Image (tube, rainbow, N blue to C red):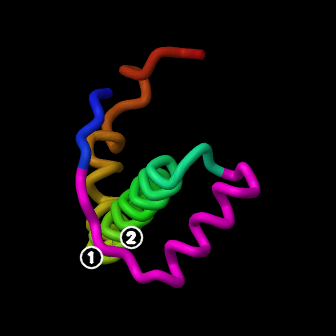
Amino acid sequence: MPKTKVAVTVDAALLDRVDELVQKRRFANRSQAVERALAETLERLARTRLARECAKLDPREEKALAEEGLAGSLETWPEY
């Protein structure tokens, strides 16, 4: 995936913590640390949004939709 350079303003104390992680070789450099933090945050936000959307669903309605068509004859189902 191609990389794009950006300039950001970061709190000095936060940057100190990132530099400590780089010094301890947890990350190769600041860019890698920031990229990983951004990616993980975006993934977490996506999961949170999915949970919020799922919470809007009516379980009874979803069950009825899932079972739709299952009430038919069992003879039409293949034997396993």
Residue at the farthest top position: 79
Magenta region: 6-26
| Whole-percent x, y for residue 64 in the image | 30, 59
Task: First in sequence, mark 1 or 2: give its number.
Answer: 2
What residue is shown at x 27% (from left), y 28% (from top)?
A: 2
Residue nearest the viewer, comparing 56 with 42: 42
| Whole-percent x, y for residue 67 in the image | 34, 49
What residue is shown at x 45% (from left), y 58% (from top)?
A: 34
On residue 48, the disc is: 2
Please identify the quarter of the rendering in which residue 42 is found. bottom left
**Residue type highlighted by circle 1:** Lys
What residue is shown at x 43% (from left), y 29% (from top)?
A: 74
**Image position of 24 (left or right of 28):** right
Classify 37 as above or below 67: below
What residue is shown at x 47% (from left), y 15% (from top)?
A: 78
How many other residues sit within 10 Å of disc 2, few (<14), some (14-19) or many (≥20)? few
**SS label for mark 2:** helix
Q: Report the quarter where the N terminus lies.
A: top left
Q: Which residue is mark 1?
A: 56
Q: Is residue 78 magenta?
A: no
Total marks shown come to 2
**SS label for mark 1:** loop
